[in-house]
Amino acid sequence: MTQKILVLSGDGIGKEIVAEALKVIEVLSSDFGLAVDLEYAEIGGAAYDVAGHPYPEATQKKAATADAILLGAVGGYEYEALPRELRPERGLLAIRADLDLFSNLRPAILNETLAGASSLRAEVVAGLDIMIVRELTGGIYFGQPRAIETNEKGERFAYNTMIYKESEIERIAHSAFKIAMQRDKRLCSVDKANVLEVSELWREVVIRVGADYPDVELTHMYVDNAAMQLVKAPKQFDVMVTGNLFGDILSDAAAMLTGSIGMLPSASLNAKGLGMYEPIHGSAPDIAGQNVANPLATIMSVSMMLRYSLDHVALADKIDRAVEKVLAQGYRTADIFEAGMKQVGTAEMGDAVVAALKA
Ligand code: NAD
């Protein structure tokens, strides 16, 4: 069965890094039997330029029928003066909401050869491989009521609502348990159940869902301890699942354990398994068009796409091994360069991964 990938390169370095990811998809198609049709559309500033909106109808239509979406990045200096609802980043929020991409997968992986790039000691992080599953469409970022108001004494006060329905917790828990099943079968649910009712319900529902996955070892951790453990002994974790707010903070902290923004992929999935795959970094307008951006986060986003949406786990492993190989061979883009290594540009790094795949 031929599967359909929608390619949204976006802005800035988006086009350069996606071009390298497409080289990888091409070689998997020509040499390893991957059957995919590629469709292309615009998002972000590029979409505003041609259609006057960062998530235009033509893109929505293509997204609705795709099996998976590959996204570069959005944003650029030239769009900063636009009204908020027309800014490139709005395109990203709109496609996430449109497709109900509630499950955000943020791996923090640190290849042994790059351990020197971390702010932590190499032995604490070398070989790190954590997957943080963050609930993306609920919780305090969306809860109602929310407002800044003034009381009868004239003092201003503000409030937000942290709210989760059982069904929202159930679906993110299923998503996390399924991912744990594909990995080391250990899931740590992060909450603040000692203080928050919303966390009490979270924990209860996660435990209930866990009965469907008897092979997965489920543990629970309070978020303050989880933050501490992530910087103290991060390799203890396999998969972590948590709500929107805690996940936002913990996934950024975990990403920075690896010290290298150009190396980290991500995925956002909906209940049907449709996923949008993208590097965690932005459009890097400061280096766009110079053939210096690191394409590996985008190439590893293709690996995640094959693993989590397209059911080609063996091909995903192949990409991961090819990336490990080029790093072991000493290829480095400027962002991860160290003395004694071979500095290469965006296109040369893509070519090196293709060569490693073919070898
Ligand atoms: P950024 O991630 O684009 O860049 C931060 C720094 O990291 C820059 O110095 C950049 O050169 C470097 N960098 C990023 N990706 C790199 C790569 N692949 N290789 C080498 N170096 C890399 O973040 P920013 O500068 O805060 O934002 C720039 C634009 O991107 C803004 O318009 C912002 O809104 C947007 N943005 C988009 C996304 C997204 O599309 N998912 C995410 C974050 C920011």
Image (cartoon, rainbow, N blue to C red):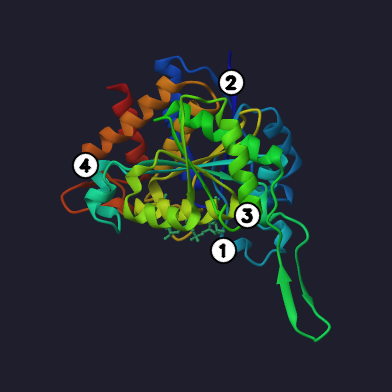
Residue 169 in view in this figure: yes
Q: Alpha-carbon neighbours of circle 2 within 10 Å: few (<14), some, or many (≥20)?
A: some
Q: Which residue corresponds to mark 1? A: 77
Q: Which residue is nearer to you in this view: 301 or 199?
A: 199
Question: With respect to residue 158, does 355 lie above or below?
Answer: above
> Percent position (x, y) of residue 328?
22, 37
Q: Cα distance, mark 1 to mark 4? A: 34 Å
Q: Alpha-carbon neighbours of circle 1 within 10 Å: few (<14), some, or many (≥20)?
A: few
Q: Which residue is nearer to you in this view: 285 or 220?
A: 220
Proximity of marks 1 and 3: CB atoms separated by less than 8 Å: no
**Closer to the N terminus: mark 2 or mark 4?**
2
Q: Cα distance, mark 3 to mark 4? A: 35 Å
Q: Quadrant of residue 156?
A: bottom right
Q: Alpha-carbon neighbours of circle 3 within 10 Å: few (<14), some, or many (≥20)?
A: many
Q: Alpha-carbon neighbours of circle 4 within 10 Å: few (<14), some, or many (≥20)?
A: some
Q: Which residue corresponds to mark 2? A: 3
Q: Cα distance, mark 2 to mark 4? A: 34 Å
Q: Amino acid at mark 3?
A: Glu
Please state which of the two labelled residues, at mark 1 or mark 2, is closer to the viewer: 2
Q: Cα distance, mark 1 to mark 3? A: 12 Å
On whether ligand 1 comes within 8 Å of the CB at mark 3, the answer is yes
Q: Which residue corresponds to mark 4? A: 330
Q: Amino acid at mark 2?
A: Gln
Residue at 73 percent across and 76 percent down: it is: 157
29 relative position to 322: left or right = right
Please state which of the two labelled residues, at mark 1 or mark 4, is closer to the viewer: 4
Question: With respect to residue 260, does 6 lie above or below?
Answer: above
On whether ligand 1 comes within 8 Å of the CB at mark 1, the answer is yes
